[in-house]
Image (cartoon, rainbow, N blue to C red):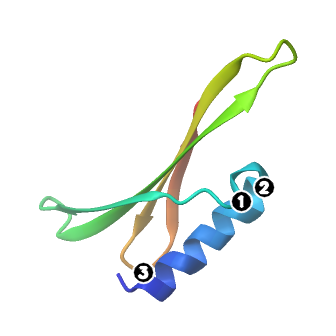
Amino acid sequence: MDAKKIREIIQRIYQRYPSLKGVSPQVREVFIPELGQKRITLTFRTTSLTENRKRIPKWIRATVNEQGKILKISSSK
């Protein structure tokens, strides 16, 4: 998948999760032989502060197909 398409997907994730603005994702591309397709996984990692100043790690992972369609988004906490 080209970089332009990945940037568009990242912008869609930023719209859905504004707290991730400025966080660069880890991008992985995996070929799935059973489907004969590639899947791209974008993993965003950040931390949030609680009221009592403790840091909580937050992960958001988006799975995307070759055409750029977001198949699944999962998040922690």
Q: Residue at x 66, y 72 (%)?
A: 11
Percent coordinates x, y for residue 34 in the rendering: 14, 58
Q: CA–CA distance between discs 3 and 1?
A: 24 Å
Answer whether residue 77 is visible to the viewer in this image: no
Q: Is residue 47 above or below residue 32?
A: above
If the image is split into quadrants, where does the C terminus sit? top right
Q: Is residue 18 above or below residue 70?
A: above
Q: Nearer the viewer, residue 63 or 50?
A: 50
Residue 67 marker: 3
For numbered disc 1, what is the local secondary structure?
loop
Label 2 Cα crowd, 10 Å radius (few <14 / some 14-19 / many 20+):
few
* Of the image marks 3 and 1, the number of the one nearer the N terminus: 1
Q: Is residue 52 above or below residue 70?
A: above
Residue 18 marker: 2
Mark 2–mark 1 contact, CB under 8 Å? yes
Residue where numbered disc 1 is placed: 21
